[in-house]
């Protein structure tokens, strides 16, 4: 089969963000746009000839077309074998799993995570390396540099592959294998968790659960694992069929966008346990009956109880959280006598720590939790971890979490997002804060005294690489904190994220409403940054 060389010219906007390249579908559909980026990935890699590439996506609009394009290009560039999820589907954690299990050279995931989909929605593409994790920054920068200089890409003149038919097809020297997207992942979950025990809990008949797949990629995974293998009643997984537009929804499992599930868990006759995942299956939300578990608390609870779960019974090497994530897990690490690392936002920063076996569990406040079993955060894994704990401890979600607070103290925590603000105004706001950091330490605001203010920089303890400008932190004496940063995943304007945290050790004061408990900090966050004045917004778009 003849490899064709297609002439092209660069686009200047292909720098990957927090998690790959994300743009509107209409941007990706410009002639050569996707191809340029894919070729720039391949041109940044060495030694993949004859090796395996894993390929799949979250099933959103343009997924299938992009899969066909990438199959041709990967074959033309000399990959020996392509493992492609059936119907072009592979969740982000499942891709990581397949890369690792089959010792692939790397993988390409087509997803814009939780961003809405459809012809007017978003599309995205990310490259994962042989460890199964997101490309580290030097690689994403190399991809960007190549995208600015590209003159040609390689492809084949070939028919579309039938993505629905499992099995192998030859494309020139390349074997294209359509794989079951669920099998390898489900097998790994069975190794980590006590399926018999969870099955027994579910089959008591008194335990009820609802999982909301939000019409995104986790539907087939959740039906197979929760219903078929663990015996949950059929229909307990709702919105289970992946749709190209995610049913018109916003598949972000949080209190705002997973409203249907939240209403169910807070309504009458609520099930005992509720959970949801996002577009590509790497995020999770955990709910008990009339109880929301913040992702930061979830990480802390999993760390404190990991020894009760088969995959982690030998204990944890260490833990890590992204800087804006609440410091609840730090207190657990202290008690366990293990290291707790503070990394910049984005899963890619956990990769080195996991590879070096310095940590076992890690997480972010943005509904992402994961472990050394993969190199991505993993939505269903977190749900199964909780199910395993519920089966062992035979307590409710609320009792487990409030018991945790009594033991370790409670970190009241919330994130306020101002979406779609003017990019220049947001940049100026951050710049002004940055300038202030030098003069804030020691200043008092009501009961709050600033102990440290800086622009967070991280030196990777494994490879020594330095990442600067990762968010403005303002720390106060008694464990309170405000963090400001701009999102790196949006596709329109800028999103300002303000993270608020306050520590409450007194069990008698751990039952307040979160926003009320944080009221002073919320007020101060605006006063310090001039949010209303600079953005023209008098309230956040989303509060989680
Ligand atoms: C957001 C989250 C971050 C997460 C990323 C990818 O990035 O805040 O924790 O790793 O999505 O899911 P941001 O938009 O804040 O750059
Ligand atoms: Zn995601």
Image (cartoon, rainbow, N blue to C red):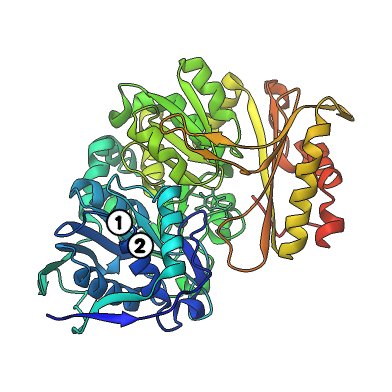
Q: Percent position (x, y) of residue 259?
A: 58, 59
Q: Is residue 26 above or below residue 453?
A: below
Q: Position of residue 219 (x, y in %)?
A: 36, 61
Which label is found at residue 41?
2
> 164 above or below 388?
below
Q: Write the residue at 34% across / 36% down.
A: 372
- For the point 59% across and 41% down, the residue is 468
Vertical order, 106 against 55 (above or below): above
Can residue 146 be seen from the camera position used here? Answer: yes
Quadrant occupied by the N terminus: bottom left
Q: Which mark is residue 373?
A: none
The residue lying at 30 percent from left, 63 percent from top is: 42
Find residue 239 and report its horizontal and vertical position in percent.
42, 65
CB within 8 Å, label 1 to label 2: yes
Q: Secondary structure at mark 2?
A: helix
Q: Quadrant of residue 34?
A: bottom left
The residue under label 1 is 45
**Cα distance in 3D space between marks 1 and 2:** 7 Å
Tell me if residue 235 can be seen: no
Q: Is residue 136 left or right of residue 488?
A: left
């Amino acid at each position: 089969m003849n490899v064709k060389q297609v002439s092209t010219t660069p686009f200047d906007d292909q720098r990957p963000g927090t998690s790959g390249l994300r743009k509107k579908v209409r941007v990706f559909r410009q002639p050569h746009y996707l191809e340029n980026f894919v070729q720039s990935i391949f041109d940044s890699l060495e030694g993949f000839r004859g090796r395996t590439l894993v390929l799949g996506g979250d099933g959103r609009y343009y997924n299938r077309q992009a899969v066909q394009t990438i199959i041709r290009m990967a074959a033309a560039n000399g990959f020996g074998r392509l493992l492609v999820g059936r119907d072009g589907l592979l969740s982000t954690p499942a891709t990581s799993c397949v890369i690792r299990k089959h010792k692939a050279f790397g993988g390409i995931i087509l997803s814009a995570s939780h961003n809405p989909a459809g012809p007017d929605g978003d599309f995205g593409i990310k490259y994962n390396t042989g460890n199964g994790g997101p490309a580290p920054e030097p690689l994403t920068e190399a991809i960007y540099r190549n995208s600015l200089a590209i003159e040609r890409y390689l492809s084949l003149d070939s028919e579309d592959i039938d993505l629905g038919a499992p099995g192998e097809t030859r494309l020139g020297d390349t074997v294209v294998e359509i794989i079951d997207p669920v099998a390898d992942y489900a097998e790994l979950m069975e190794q980590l968790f006590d399926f018999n025990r969870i099955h027994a809990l579910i089959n008591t008949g008194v335990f009820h659960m609802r999982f909301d797949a939000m019409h995104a990629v986790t539907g087939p995974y959740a039906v197979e694992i929760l219903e078929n293998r663990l015996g949950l009643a059929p229909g307990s997984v709702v919105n289970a069929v992946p749709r190209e537009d995610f049913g018109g929804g916003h598949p972000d499992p949080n209190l705002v966008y997973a409203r249907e599930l939240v209403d169910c868990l807070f309504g009458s006759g609520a099930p005992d346990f509720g959970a949801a995942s996002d577009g590509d299956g790497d995020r999770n939300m955990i709910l008990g009956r009339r109880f929301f578990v913040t992702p930061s608390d979830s990480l802390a609870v999993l760390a404190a109880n990991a020894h009760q779960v088969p995959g982690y019974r030998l204990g944890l090497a260490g833990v890590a959280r992204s800087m804006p994530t609440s410091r609840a897990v730090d207190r657990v690490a202290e008690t366990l006598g293990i290291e707790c690392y503070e990394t910049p936002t984005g899963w890619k920063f956990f990769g080195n720590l996991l590879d070096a076996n310095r940590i076992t569990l890690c997480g972010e406040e943005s509904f992402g939790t994961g472990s050394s079993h993969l190199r991505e955060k993993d939505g269903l894994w977190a749900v199964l971890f909780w199910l395993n704990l519920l089966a062992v401890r035979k307590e409710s979600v609320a009792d487990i979490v409030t018991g945790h607070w009594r033991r370790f103290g409670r970190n009241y925590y919330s994130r306020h997002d101002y979406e779609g603000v003017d990019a220049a105004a947001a940049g100026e706001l951050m710049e002004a804060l940055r300038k202030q950091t030098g003069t804030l330490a020691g200043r008092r605001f009501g009961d709050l005294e600033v102990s440290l203010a800086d622009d967070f920089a991280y030196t990777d303890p494994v490879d020594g690489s330095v990442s600067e400008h990762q968010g403005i932190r303002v720390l106060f004496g008694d464990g309170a904190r405000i963090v400001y940063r701009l999102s790196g995943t949006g596709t329109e304007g800028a999103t300002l994220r303000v993270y608020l945290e306050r520590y409450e050790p007194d069990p008698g004061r751990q039952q307040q409403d979160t926003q009320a408990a944080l009221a002073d900090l919320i007020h101060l966050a605006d006063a310090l940054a001039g949010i209303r004045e600079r953005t023209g917004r008098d309230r956040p778009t989303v509060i989680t």
